[in-house]
Image (cartoon, helix red, strand yellow):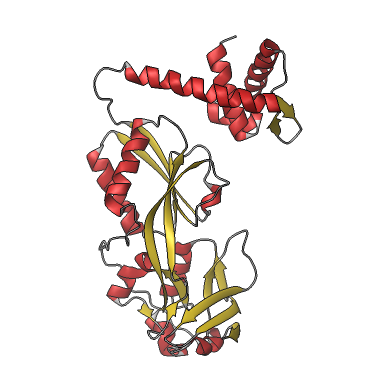
Amino acid sequence: MNHVYAMRVFVQAAEARSFRSAAKQLNVSTALVTRSVANLEAHLRTRLMNRTTRAVSLTEAGKHYLDGCRAILEELDRLDASVSAGEREIAGVLRIMATDALSPEVMTALIDGFRRRYPKVQVRLSLTDREADQFAEGYDAGLLVASPSTDVDCIQLPLVTQSLVPCAAPSYLSTCGNPQEPAQLEVHSCIATMTAEKRGPTAWQFVDVNDLQSVTFRPSYAANSSLLIRLAAIAGMGIVLLPESLVAEDLARGVLKRIMPGYHVDGSTTQVWLFYPRRRFLPPVTGAFITYMLEHAGRAGSTVPAIRARSLPRPKHSTSASECGGDLAMSG
C-alpha cells in the first residue's frame, strides 16, 4: 500500500463525503478509492468511515485521523515546495466560479489583466447563480454573492460592494409610464431573479426621507441569471432591480433609465466575496489570483470600477399596454 497516496484518497473522500465524487475529482475509479480506504482501515485495524448507498460519513476515529492526515500532507507539500529551485513560475489552469451579477465587461477586464500579468495561466471561468454557501469542490477560487457562511470550509474575504438600482428601458417607460413612487409599481410588469431556494412572491423595499415601503409581487418574468434579467429589461419587458455595476454602461448610454430617483433600495447593496479553499499551502496560481483580486478591488469592498464596453445596437421593441400590468401588494 502506498500510504501517502492512500491518505490523500481518504482526505478527498472525507471532504467529498462520497467515494464516487472523490474518484471523479482524483480522476480514478470508484473501486480504487474504496480499496484505498479499506486498506487504510485494515492497516489501522479500525473503521474510519460509515458507508451507506448514498454517502459516507466519518467515525470518531475517522475524524481524528482526518485531522492528522491533513497536517501530515500539508507539511509534506510544504517540504516539496521548499526544495524547488528559485521562484516557482505562475502557470497552469485556474478554475474560477463567479456570480453572474458581476458586469461581464468588468469580469472580462479583470481576467484579461490577470492573464497579461501571468500569460502562462489558463483560466476556466464558470458563471453561476449559486450563493456563497454553495461554493463547489473542484474550483480554485470563487466570486460569489452573499454573507459569509460557516457551512463552507473555505476562506471568505469581502471583495466588492455593489448598489442595487431600479431601472427599465425607455421603450417600456414610454408605453407604460414612469413610476415615481413604489405604490405605482402596482400597474407595472416587474422582473426578478430566481433561485432554487427562493420561489414564489418577491419583495422589494424602498426608502425615502420619511418611511419604508415594501412591495410584494409575483414577477411577470423571473430567471436564475442576472444577465438574462438585464437583457429582459433592455428588451422592454419590465422593471428590474440589478447591481449598479451590471447596468452602469446601459444607464450611461441610455439603454436603461433609472426610475424613482427620490427613493433608494433598502439594504441597497450586495456584497461579492472572494472564496478559496482552506489550505495551508495554496497552489501558486491560486495565490497569485487572490493577490491580484485584492489589489484591484480592495479588502474593504470598494465599488466595482466602471469599465467602458463597445457600444451595442439599441434593441427595437414595442411594448403594448397589456404588458404593463403586474400582480403586486403594497405595505408601508
Q: Residue at x 58, y 22 (%)?
A: 9
> At which x and y percent is residue 106?
32, 57
Which residue is found at the position 55% from the left and 22% from the top? 69
Residue 45 falls left or right of residue 95: right
Residue 77's quadrant in the figure?
top left
In the visual, does 305 lie left or right of 2?
Answer: left
Q: In the rendered image of this protein, does residue 23 appear above or below residue 329?
A: above
* Closer-to-camera residue (9/238): 9
Quarter assignment of residue 175: bottom left
Residues 57 and 327: in front is 57
In this view, the residue in front, 287 or 27, is: 287
Image quadrant in which the N terminus is located? top right
The number of numbered badges drawn on the structure is 0
Q: Quadrant of the C terminus?
A: bottom right
Decide: is 208 above or below 65: below
In percent of width and height, residue 281 lies at 40, 29
Instruction: State whether residue 28 appears in this view.
Output: no
Farthest-out residue, right: 52
**Is 34 displayed left or right of 261 in the figure?**
right
Asked if residue 89 is positioned above or below residue 329 in the image, the reply reads above
Q: Position of residue 57 (x, y in %)?
A: 69, 32
